Image (cartoon, rainbow, N blue to C red):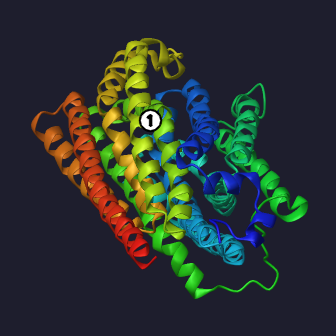
Amino acid sequence: MGYQSDIMKKEMTSDVKMLLGNPKKAIIAMSIPIIIAMIAQSANNLIDSVWVAGLGPNALAAVGLVFPLFFIIIGIGNGIGIGASSAIGRRIGRKDKDGADRTASQSIGLTVAIGIIVAILLLLIQRPLMLMLGAGDTIGFCIDYGTPIFICIPILLLNSVFSNLLIAEGAAKRSMMIQILAAIINICLDPIFIYDYGLGMGMAGAAWATVIAVTTSLIVMMYWYFIKKNTYLDIKLRGFRFNKEIDNDIFRVGIPSSVEMIFMSFMAMLMNIIIIIVGGTDGVAIYSATWRLIQMIMIPLMAVGSSIVPICAVAYGAKRYDKIKDAYNFSIKFCILIMIILAALVAIFADYLVFIFTYSESTALLKEDIVLCIRMMCIFLPFMAWGFVASGFFQGIGMGLKSLISTILRSGIQIPVCYALAITAGTLMSIWWGIVATEIAGSVFVGLWSLLILRILVKEYKSHADDNISEN
């Protein structure tokens, strides 16, 4: 019997065949459309900031204050999706098509239940939470922007999960298509919803434009899965019941992944508070604008990190640890090269890139500070390649807790270091250096840890291979 069973051959799509093939080719085939998809997804967030910047610094700062909460929401959806992607991939590797289908169905049920609970909770506590995070005079802007997003949390979570299900079965091009669709819709709706020459809804308009764009992309994905049914995974919700065994398998990676993103968002909230101590709301605006550009630059890292999850999961399910090693080594080299090139280009052209945040008279005064911050953040980008690949590797083989631990250790150091620098040095520059140093240290740590685990797996694979040769 070969790597795939005869039954699976009849049911496999070309995307699944790609996952089961050469891991290096699979990384490229998956990463390119995911990069494009993530650019479109980030554009949804970036576009809000660009249009909102026209409402003044307080509005831009409000987006920065709400964004960590938005990131938590997306983190929950991505966590469930990544957990499902890993569990589905391992079942595909074991040639268990029915198990992969049931895992996909469970992920949808979990998402709806969790989405309703989170939406109710955030709507109840949003005002005191925003004030606690330092909203101050921007509280009105924060509520206007946050309320539509919190109301539609189940939709946002489902969008993330369905996108991850497409990636789980290797259909990265489809995921790319729906993210581009959402970005185009958001681009068209933002100015109409925000300004007086349209609906004049201000901050609330920016949020509703994003929600409508995401809802449209979700409808397209549901059409593929439930009506056209031209996907590998067959999601069946009729007579749905929670399955403890499958739920635990999803949560084994999904909970650490969600907690990891939530923890990062919580750390971002604390970072905003630290920055306010030194630089006020202008400091938050500088950090928010800078981090949005840095996240755009990190898209290739996030894309490869997402790609390696199903690829490693499939190989792990089939006990092909040699393929895991090939995917891991290739991904690191690929990411480091890309990050060196992008970091250099962004540092050189930073003066031009910041225009999207400083085109209005009220935000133009922040230009030099944003440029400086961007150039400093570019320093740690090549180091983060190792960290992102390592996290994807951990999640793919079902060790999401290790990825979470490494993130907690890194961010756990970053906050006290930056707080100490804010109190002692009292400058934004000192905080930026603290971020750079801790990001580098954290990436190196998780990279070394993942390398150790990989060597253990490869050693186990070689031992089994030698045993099989001896028996024959």
**Quarter occupied by residue 13:** bottom right
- Left-right relation of 472 to 378: right
Residue topped by disc 1: 334
Position above or below: 418 against 218? above
**Quarter occupied by residue 378:** top left
Image coordinates for residue 454, horizontal then vertical, percent:
34, 59
- Left-right relation of 121 to 347: right
Image coordinates for residue 408, horizontal then vertical, percent:
29, 59
Query: What residue lies at 42% left-to-right and 46% top-to-bottom?
Result: 135
**Secondary element type, mark 1:** helix
Marker count (numbered): 1
Query: What residue lies at 45% left-to-right and 36% top-to-bottom?
Result: 298
Position above or below: 164 against 119? above
Position above or below: 464 against 352? below
Image coordinates for residue 416, horizontal then vertical, percent:
18, 50
- Observer-nearest residue: 171 or 256? 171
Query: What residue lies at 61% left-to-right and 42% top-to-bottom?
Result: 34
